[in-house]
Image (cartoon, rainbow, N blue to C red):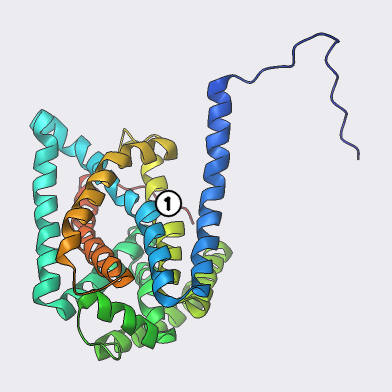
Amino acid sequence: MRRPSPIPAAAGADAPRIPPPVLRRVTLRGAASCLLPGAALLLAATALLPRETGWLAVLILVIGLGVPHGALDGEVAKPLLRPRFGRAWFPVFAAPYLALTAAVLAAWRLAPEATLAGFLALSVLHFGREDAGPGRPVEALVRGGLPIALPALLRPDATARVFAVVTGTAMPVLPAWWVLLAQAWLGLALVWLLAARPAPRLLAELAALALAFLVLPPLSAFGLYFVCLHAPRHMRALADDPARAPSVDGMGRAVVLALPVFALTLLIGLLLWPTYPQAPGAGRLLALTLQLLAALTLPHLLLDAWVERSGARPEPDR
């Protein structure tokens, strides 16, 4: 069936004009729709680069596109704190948040392997709750454990090289506890897949992630998950829930509101940079970025738990 031809404008008549605000929104929406596929292609392409160059490329994408989702924590805390503390709500929020961050950064120096174990456990909990939603503990453990367990199962040597740099310790092989827990996760995941029979869309997501961890270096695969799934899913959940973060009424608004705290996070990173001389080149950025992500994960997770106790969270997209 042929499409009808457009009716030509009368001779001398002006062509219909699209209002600038509408044109701007359409342009921004089109650019945003290309952002995540473009980031995914770039992250996959890092597998073709030399190791440290690939690390650097992944970290730039993780910092630029993944870290800002946590910069919305202030917008989440504001509705709970501002009615009680007025204009002083932000210092009341920021002081314990930064204190917890500093405590985790100090723990990396004092007990690196124990801090690594805590970071991985918190990551499984956080990723799982974000992906599966509340009330699904087994699914949350399976989904949250995937980006933590698969690197240990599929590429243990490369994963050990990454975390030797992050912890600043000799790590020729992964710690035995990580490997054993990864194997236990695999058994649980297989049982859950057979018993729960998840929807095709979820199966496709899990299969795509497993394939990424199979064919890509561990840091590239983790960056793909963090940038293209975890961060946008968190921001979309806030944009779709006006009760949780009233100011975040859309993805565009979420990005704008994240910018000030994101800039502050970058400033903190720059101030910390001179304290990481033990890892040269891209390794220095790797150690700083993952340690800082771990440090921010603890208050981020505690804030989510506090908000959940204060009101119901919406169901995630499935």
Q: Residue at x 31, y 41 (%)?
A: 259
Where residue 118 sits, quadrant-wise, is bottom left
- Image position, residue 273 (x, y; %): 20, 61
- Image position, residue 121 (x, y; %): 25, 72
Depth check, front residue: 3 or 268: 268
107 versus 28 height, above or below: below
Judged left or right of residue 215, residue 156 is left
- Image position, residue 274 (x, y; %): 17, 62
Q: Residue at x 12, y 29 (%)?
A: 87
Q: Residue at x 33, y 49 (%)?
A: 68
Judged left or right of residue 243, residue 275 is left
The answer to whether residue 187 shows anywhere in this view is no
Q: Which residue matches tag 1?
A: 232
Depth check, front residue: 218 or 287: 287
Q: Quadrant location of the N terminus?
A: top right
Q: Residue at x 9, y 62 (%)?
A: 103
Judged left or right of residue 257, residue 9 is right
Where residue 269 sits, quadrant-wise, is bottom left
